[in-house]
Amino acid sequence: MYFLQNLEDCLPKDGDDHEHVLLSDHQKGLINAVDTIFPNTAHGYCLCHLVDNVKKKFKPSQEVLNLT
């Protein structure tokens, strides 16, 4: 949370003219922290991390292997 709090201090605050999107690796702690510190910010997940997680969880087919 420390990093996100400092990141928030660095981002522009002049009205709601700026929209932000945060990308993460889907860590549980980050999900809650982003929701707390940036409640109105879109939060997405890094495709590379998602593909790696699919490969770990399921036996990779050739289609999954070609995603990276």
Image (tube, grey):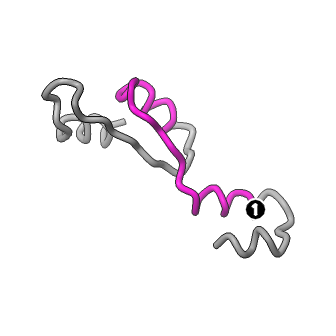
Q: Position of residue 3 (x, y in %)?
A: 31, 43
Q: Which residues are magenta?
A: 30-56
Label 1 crowd (10 A; few <14 / some 14-19 / many >=20):
few
Q: Secondary structure at mark 1?
A: helix
Quadrant containing the C terminus in the rendered view: bottom right
Q: Position of residue 41 (x, y in %)?
A: 39, 32
Left or right position of 44 against 6: right
Residue 63 in which image quadrant: bottom right
Query: Is 53 displayed left or right of 11 in the figure?
Result: right
Q: Residue at x 53, y 55 (%)?
A: 46
Q: Is residue 10 above or below residue 64?
A: above
Q: Is residue 50 above or below residue 41?
A: below
- Residue lying at the far front in this picture: please name it: 17
Q: Nearer the viewer, residue 28 or 15?
A: 15
- Assign the N terminus to one quadrant of the image: top left
Q: Is residue 54 above or below residue 21?
A: below
Q: Quadrant of residue 36?
A: top left
Whether residue 11 appears in magenta in the rendering, the answer is no
Above or below, comparing residue 19 to residue 61 in the picture: above
Q: Which residue is depicted at the point 17% across and 24% down?
A: 15
Type of amino acid at the residue the image marks with label 1: Lys
Side of 35 where 14 appears, left or right: left
Looking at this view, is 45 or 15 the one in front?
A: 15
Residue for point 75% across, 62% down: 56
Q: Which residue is mark 1?
A: 56
Residue 28 in picture, x, y percent from top left: 57, 38
Among the 4 quarters of the image, the one containing residue 12: top left
Q: Magenta part mainly helix, strand or loop?
A: helix
Between 31 and 13, the one lying in front of the other is 13
- Which is nearer the eye, 50 or 63? 63
Would you say residue 37 sits in the magenta stretch? yes
